[in-house]
Structure formats: structure tokens, C-alpha cells
Image (spheres, helix red, strand yellow):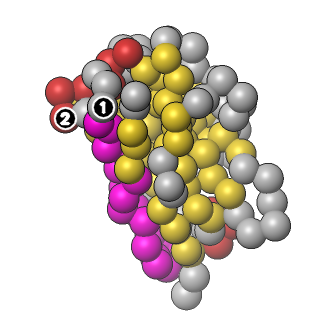
């Protein structure tokens, strides 16, 4: 059973950067596509990026693709989300999620392993 733990969130000023980490245990990470999702207060959880099991395919939500970079290090069982030029509208709880296989999508439905989330707050 894949277990995921996010870290790296925090309070940052607009224009700043953060690197979120998603650490995996319980199952080899290279079997899984990993997605990053976020949920702002009062809003639906939305997918922002995913990376296929091999790392060969990545996909981004249009609104973030120039500022977010997803990467993975299967040897370290970790997936990263680099967020640059943070904006107040990026404020949300960020979750990583896993699905078995190589399908890379931003829909929540196929993902059945979820972390507990890490809070990102962008404010001056």
C-alpha cells in the first residue's frame, strides 16, 4: 500500500518560491504516477500537475504551467513540485496523490492514494 507524506509548505510573500516534497513509502514509487492537487478554502480540489511513473511525461494545469515544475527521484522515493513567482491565489492546501501505472491526468478520480496535505499561504 502506497503511503504519501507532503512537506515544504509554509508562509511566503508574493513573488517567492517554494519546493514541495511528496515522500513515498510502502511500495516502490516507480510503479506510480504522482499528481499534485490543491484545495483553496471554499473551492473544489483541483489538479495542478502530474508526472508519469517513469518521469517521461508531465502535465500541468494551464494556469500554472509557466511557474510550476514537477520532478521525481525514484531512488529517493520522492516527487517534487517547484513553485515559483507565487501569487496569493496559489494559497491552498497542496496534496500529492498516486495512481498505479503510467497514466498522467489531472482528474482526482483515478488517484486512490493520498497524502494529508501541506498548507501553502502566499501573503505579504
The residue indicated by pointer 1 is 26
Q: Is residue 116 above or below residue 37?
A: below
Asked whether 121 falls inside the magenta stretch, the response is no
How packed is label 2: few (under 14 Cα within 10 Å), some, or many (20 or more)? Answer: few
Sequence-wise, the earlier of marks 2 and 1 is 1
Question: Could you give the CA–CA distance between mark 2 and mark 1, rounded to whole angstroms?
Answer: 13 Å
On the image, which quarter does residue 10 sit in?
A: bottom left
Q: Estimate the x, y position of residue 49 in percent, counting from the top left.
A: 57, 36
Q: Secondary structure at mark 1?
A: loop
Marking on residue 76:
2
Q: Estimate the x, y position of residue 87 in percent, counting from the top left.
A: 61, 67
Q: Is residue 106 left or right of residue 24?
A: right
> Which residue is drawn at the image coordinates 43% and 21% (left, top)?
32
On the image, which quarter does residue 79 sit in?
A: top left
- Quick one: quadrant of the C terminus? bottom right
Residue bounds of the magenta highlight: 6-25
Amino acid at each position: 500500500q502506497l503511503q504519501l507524506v507532503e512537506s515544504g509548505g509554509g508562509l511566503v510573500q508574493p513573488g517567492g518560491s517554494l519546493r514541495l516534497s511528496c515522500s513515498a513509502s510502502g511500495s516502490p514509487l516507480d510503479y506510480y504516477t504522482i499528481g499534485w492537487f490543491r484545495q483553496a478554502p471554499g473551492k473544489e480540489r483541483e489538479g495542478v500537475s502530474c508526472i508519469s511513473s517513469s518521469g517521461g511525461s508531465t502535465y500541468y494545469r494551464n494556469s500554472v504551467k509557466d511557474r510550476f515544475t514537477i520532478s521525481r527521484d525514484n531512488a529517493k522515493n520522492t516527487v517534487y513540485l517547484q513553485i515559483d513567482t507565487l501569487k496569493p491565489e496559489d494559497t491552498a492546501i497542496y496534496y500529492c496523490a498516486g495512481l498505479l501505472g503510467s497514466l498522467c491526468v489531472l482528474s482526482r478520480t483515478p488517484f486512490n492514494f493520498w497524502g494529508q496535505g501541506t498548507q501553502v499561504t502566499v501573503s505579504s
